[in-house]
C-alpha cells in the first residue's frame, strides 16, 4: 500500500509516496482502508519542521481522515466507516502530557497512507449522510470547534458567538454555533468571504480591515452587553480586540496555533471583567462522539474547498499555505 | 382599576372582579399597566384551594402576564414592556425557602389586575417581536422548560430530549429543544396533538395509548442508547417509563406538579444507571433573561390556544381544566 | 493458584476454593498477584443470587482488592501495587450500558483469586502509606463516596453533609467529607456506633431510633437552612426524612442498593425545592485516581473491622450479613 | 460622625478626617455603625489616583470593613454584625458592567466612615468567632481567594494549589486551600515569610529568588504531573513560570491588579496544554455567604499584621506600600 512520507529532512519538497507493507491489526486494534484525508494548518507546520523540529523522520503526515474497517484484531467487532481520533489515548475527561503525545500526523504516523492500524477505542463511526471528503475533515477542526463551544464553552441558545476569520475551525464554529441556537458574528478581511459566511448562517459580519476596532463594533452589535464567547484563532494581535468585544464573565477560546505565532496579552482586562481564557487542544473521543450526534441532527455539511490526489500532497499543502481556500482541503487515497 | 380576586373561600365560583385603587410605586419599584395574563395549571389548583389551603384570601390569582411600566419609584429608570418574574426575590444562583415564598399568584397577589407594583429587579424586558399574549405566557411555563433543558440540564446540540404530552411546559420544551439543536421525541394520547407537535418540529412522536411501553419505544428510537433528557410532567405513573427511556448518566427533570398528584418511583434504576432526577421550580431572573436572548435569536412564537376577557376568568380556568387546549390560555385586561 | 468460586448454583454454602491455572497477561494487560480482597454488600447479594439471578456460574466473587503487578503484556510498563477498578472499561466521562457490564465480581470474575489479569488501563496505583487491607477496601466503597461528594456532588468546604448509618460507603463519606472541609452529620440506631463516628470526626450525630423525625432534627442543626448534601443509602424508608433535611437546591446521592430493597419516593418535595437526586454507581478511573491524591494529602485510614483467610470466605460473608461490623471486612489471599 | 476622605486631588497627603452628618437608611437599606476597616492594595492605588484617575472626589476610601446594624429602613429586619459586600449589586450569577461599577471605596464611598448606609441585600452576617479586625478583612481578599479556588476553580481535596507570595489574597488562598483538603505550595523571596507560611499549613515552599525557575520546581513537587491550580497575583513576570508549573487542563486564576502592572503572556502553552486562565474580580454575595460557612466550619483566623487608628489612615497606607506586612492591615474607627 502507498503512504505519503516526509523522509530525511523536513520540507514540502521532501514529501514522497512510499510503498509499504500493510500491517495486520494487533489485539484490540482495527485496520482501516483509508479513503480521504483532510489537511490542517498544523500539517503544513509539521511537514516544514516548524511544529516540532525534533519529530523523528520518516513521518506519515496528517491527522484527519476517514476509512473503512478492513480487518480487526481479537475482541473487537468489525465496524463501519470510522475516523481515527486525533489524540489516540484521550477517550474522555482530563488530558495528561502522555495522552497529548499520542496524536496522529506526528509524533505518530498519520492518515496519509492507504492502510493503517489503530486501537478500536481510537476510532469514531461517522454519520452516513456525509461524503468521505466531508467525514475526513472532522477529527481536528470540527472537534476543536465543538470542544470550544460545547464541551468547554457551554454556549447556550441565544448566546452571541464571535468567530474570527473563515479558516477550518472558524467555519465549523459558525455552523455549529448556529446549530446550537447561538447568534454568530464573523470577522474577515474579505467581503467575498463574509458573503459566504452569511450564506452559511452568520447573523452579522465585520470586515476587520475596514473596521480595525472590530471589538467595539462587535460589542455594539450586542447592545453594548458584550459577546458571550469568542473563538480566538489569531493570537496576540487579535486578542486585544476580543477582550473589547467580550462581556464580563465571558469566555475566549484560544485556538492560536493557527496564527503560527505566539501572542501576548494584557491581562488586566481579563482580570477586571472576570473573563476566562480557555486553551483548546482539539478534544477527546467522548466529545467527538457527541459531535457526531449533533451533526446527525443538524445535517451540517462541512465545507470542502478542493480535493487533491495522494500523489499531489505537496501541491495541496502549498495551496493551503496560500490561504486562498474557503473550507477544507482534502486528499483522496485513490 | 379592576382586579380578579378570590375572596371568602376557594373555588372557581368565588372569582370576582373587584375595583381597587392603583398603588403608587415605592422606591426601587415600578408600576405596571398590565395587558395580558396567561394561565398555568398551578393557577387552577390555587383558585380551587388545592395548591396551598392555608393561602390567605382575598388573592389576585395568576403568576404570568405582561404589562408596560407606567410609573417608577426613586432610583429606577422607566423601562418598556416587561414581565414580572415568578419568584420576585430569586435573581440568580441558589434558591432559599424565603425566596421560594415570593411567588406571584400566591402567596403574593398576581397578574390578574390592571395595575400592579413590583420591584424593578423583579421584572424582565421582553422582545419586541412577541405579541402581548405571547409575552404573557413566558414567566412560568417557558422559564421552567428553559431551566430544565438549559440552566440545569445542559442539553447539547444532538442530544435527544423526550417531552411528555403537549401541555404548556412541554410545548415550550419542544420548541426550545429544537432551538438548541436537540432531537425531540413527543408523547401524547392524541394523534391529532402529535400531528401538531410534528408541525412545531418534533422529530418523532409516540402515542402512549397505543404504545403503553413508550419508554422502550423511545429508547429504540435512539438505537438502544437511551435518551439524554426527559422532561417529566406526569409523576409516578410515567416515571417508570421515563427510567426505561433514559440513558445511563442521563437527566430527568421533574416538573410533576402538573400531574396534580404526587408520584412514587422505584429508585433502583436511578441508582444502577447513574441517573439524575432534577426538581425544577420555574427558575431565576438570570435564566429568564437568557431565555429572552434565546427567543430573540430563534424567533420562537409561543402557541396561544385562546384568549378570554378579564371578566371571564372563571370560564377560562374551567376551559383549562378540560385539558382540551393545545398551547396557552390567556386573559386580556381590557 | 487458588480462587474462591461459586459453582453449580448460588448460595453461601456453594462457595469453594478451586485450584486454577494462572493466566498469562495478553497485550495491554497486567497480571496481578493479589494480596487482600474487601467485601461489599453487593458481593453478598451476588453470591446469594439476589443481585443478578442470570449471572453465569462458576464465578469468582468480589470486586474490591489489591495486588502487585507480577507480569505484563506487550506495551505496558511494570507498575507497583495497584487496585483493579470496579467497571474495567469506565475510564472517564459518561458511562454506557456496555461499560456498566464490565464490573468485577460479576459478570466478570472478581478479586478472590490469587492471580488475575486485567487491562493495564483498568488499574490504579495506591498510596504507599496504606496497608494492603486498607488499599483493598477502596474500589467500590471509597470511590462511591468520592463520586457522590466530589465528582457529582461538588461539595464545598463549609457545606453540611448528612451521612446515613455507618456502613462502608457512609464511613468513607464521613472521612472524605471532613477532608473536604465539610460539616458532617451522621445518623445511626446505635449510640456506640455514633460515638465511633464522632471519633472519626463527625460534627453532630442523630440516633434515628430515638429521633424518628431525624430529617427535621438535621435541618435544625443547620439553623433551618437545610443540609447541602445527603448520602442516601437506605432507600424509600429514609428518603422521606432526607427530603425534610435537604435545603432547596441541595443534592441527595442515591446509593440505595445497600438497602437491599427498592425504595419509593414522593416526588413533590423534590420538585418544590429544586432538589436533585443523583444515582451513583461507583465511578470511573479518573475519579479513582483523584481520590488517591485526596487520600495521599489527607492521610485518611480506611476503617478495617476484621480480616478473614481466603478459605473462610463464606464465614466472612455471613459475618457481613449480620451487620455487626463497623468498617470494612477483608479477606487475605495468603 | 467622622469619615476619612480624599479631597481636591489624589495623594496620600490628601487624606483628611472629615466630620459628616450620618445618613438615615432608606427603604431596604441598613445603617451600619462601622468598627474596623481593612486595607487592600487597591485602596492604595485608588488614593494615589492610579486605579481610576477619573474617580470623582471627595471619596471615602476602602472597600473592606465590618460594622453593626444601627438602624433599618422599611421592610428589613435588624441584623447583627455584618460586612458590606464589595460590589453592592452583585448578588449571584454573572456580573455585568453596571454591576461591576457598584464597588465600595470607589466609585462608591467606602468603609472608612463611622456610619454608612447600604442596601440590606448588600451585606453578609459574619461568624461570631471572629474579632472585628478579622471580620473586616474578608470582603475583598478572602472572597477573592474563595472565588478563585472554590466558585470558579472547583478545587478538590487532594488537588495541588500553588500560591504566589504572602499578600492578603495569597494567605487566604493558603488557609482556604488547606481547609478544602488541597495540598498547597507557597512561593516567596523571603525565607522568614515561607516559615510563617509553613506554620499556617503550607505543605511545601519555594524561595523564588534562590530558584528562579520555580515553575519547574513546583512541577517536580507533583511527580512531574503539574499543579492543578495556580493563584496568580504577579502578572506577566510570573505567569511564564505558572504555565510551566500547571498540569494539562489546569486552571490559573488571574488576580493580577495586585502586581500594579499589566502582564503579558505567551499564549502558546495555554493552548497546547488545554489550560484555563480565569480572571477573578472578587465575587458575589452568594460566594461571600458560602465562604462564611466554610470559615464557621474550619475556624480559620485571618492573619492580622497591624491595626491603626482612623486618624492614622495615611500612615497605614504608607506602611502597606512598603510591603513589609504579613497579613492584613486594619483601621479601627474608634
Image (cartoon, coloured by chain):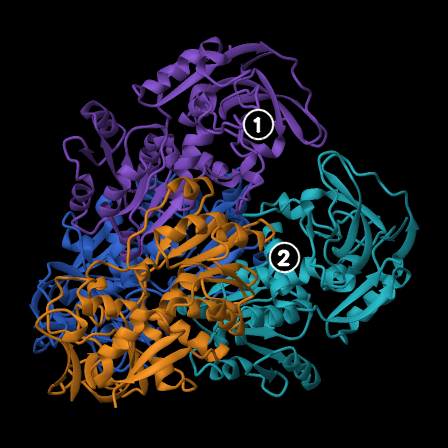
Chain colours: A orange, B cyan, C blue, D purple
Quadrant where the N terminus of chain A lies? bottom left
Where does residue A276 sit, x and y in percent of width and height? Answer: 41, 49
Crowd rating for badge 1 (residues with CA inside 10 Å; few <14, some 14–19, many 20+): some
Where does residue B121 sit, x and y in percent of width and height? Answer: 67, 43
Q: Chain of mark 2?
A: B
Where does residue B230 sit, x and y in percent of width and height? Answer: 54, 70
Say above or below: A122 vs B67: below
Say above or below: D113 vs B233: above
Along the horizontal axis of the image, is A319 left or right of C235?
A: left
Along the horizontal axis of the image, is A103 left or right of C190?
A: left
Say above or below: A226 vs C332: above
Say above or below: A250 vs B178: above
Where does residue A247 sit, x and y in percent of width and height? Answer: 51, 49
Tag on residue C287? none
The part of the image, by quadrant, that contains residue C74 is bottom left
Tag on residue B282? 2
Instruction: Give whichever of D172, A101 is nearer the camera.
Output: A101
Crowd rating for badge 2 (residues with CA inside 10 Å; few <14, some 14–19, many 20+): many
- Give SS at disc 1: loop
Which residue is drawn at the image coordinates 14% and 75% (left, top)?
A14
Name the residue tied to disc 1: D108
Distance Cα–Cα, label 1 vs label 2: 35 Å
Q: Are marks 1 and 2 in contact (CB under 8 Å)?
A: no
Q: Chain of mark 1?
A: D
Instruction: Give whichever of C294, B25 is nearer the camera.
Output: B25
Q: Residue furthest right?
A: B19
Which residue is drawn at the image coordinates 75% and 43% (left, top)?
B78
Amino acid at each position: 500500500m502507498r503512504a505519503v512520507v516526509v523522509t530525511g529532512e523536513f520540507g514540502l519538497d521532501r514529501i514522497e509516496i512510499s510503498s509499504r507493507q500493510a500491517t495486520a491489526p494487533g489485539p484490540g486494534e482495527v485496520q482501516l482502508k483509508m479513503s480521504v484525508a483532510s489537511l490542517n494548518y498544523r500539517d503544513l507546520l509539521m511537514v516544514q519542521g516548524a511544529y516540532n523540529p525534533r519529530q523523528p523522520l520518516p513521518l506519515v503526515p496528517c491527522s484527519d481522515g476517514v476509512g473503512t474497517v478492513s480487518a480487526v484484531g481479537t475482541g473487537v467487532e468489525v465496524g463501519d466507516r470510522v475516523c481515527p481520533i486525533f489524540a489516540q489515548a484521550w477517550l474522555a475527561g482530563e488530558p495528561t502530557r502522555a495522552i497529548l503525545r499520542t496524536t496522529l500526523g506526528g509524533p505518530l504516523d498519520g492518515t496519509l497512507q492507504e492502510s493503517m492500524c489503530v486501537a478500536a477505542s481510537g476510532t469514531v463511526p461517522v454519520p452516513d449522510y456525509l461524503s468521505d471528503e466531508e467525514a475526513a475533515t472532522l477529527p481536528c477542526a470540527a472537534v476543536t470547534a465543538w470542544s470550544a463551544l460545547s464541551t468547554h464553552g457551554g454556549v447556550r441558545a441565544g448566546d452571541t458567538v464571535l468567530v474570527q476569520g473563515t479558516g477550518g475551525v472558524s467555519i465549523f464554529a459558525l455552523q455549529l454555533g448556529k446549530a446550537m441556537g447561538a447568534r454568530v458574528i464573523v470577522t474577515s478581511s474579505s467581503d467575498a468571504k463574509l458573503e459566504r459566511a452569511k450564506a452559511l448562517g452568520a447573523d452579522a459580519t465585520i470586515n476587520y480591515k475596514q473596521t480595525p476596532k472590530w471589538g467595539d463594533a462587535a460589542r455594539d452589535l450586542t447592545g453594548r452587553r458584550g459577546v458571550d464567547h469568542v473563538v480566538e484563532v489569531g493570537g496576540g494581535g487579535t486578542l486585544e480586540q476580543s477582550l473589547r468585544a467580550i462581556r464580563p464573565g465571558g469566555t475566549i477560546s484560544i485556538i492560536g496555533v493557527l496564527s503560527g505565532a505566539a501572542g501576548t496579552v494584557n491581562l488586566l482586562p481579563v482580570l477586571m471583567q472576570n473573563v476566562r481564557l480557555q486553551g483548546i487542544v482539539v478534544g477527546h473521543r467522548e466529545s467527538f462522539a457527541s459531535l457526531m450526534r449533533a451533526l446527525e441532527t443538524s445535517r451540517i455539511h462541512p465545507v470542502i474547498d478542493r480535493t487533491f490526489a495522494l500523489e499531489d500532497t505537496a501541491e495541496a499543502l502549498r495551496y493551503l499555505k496560500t490561504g486562498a481556500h474557503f473550507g477544507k482541503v482534502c486528499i483522496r487515497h485513490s
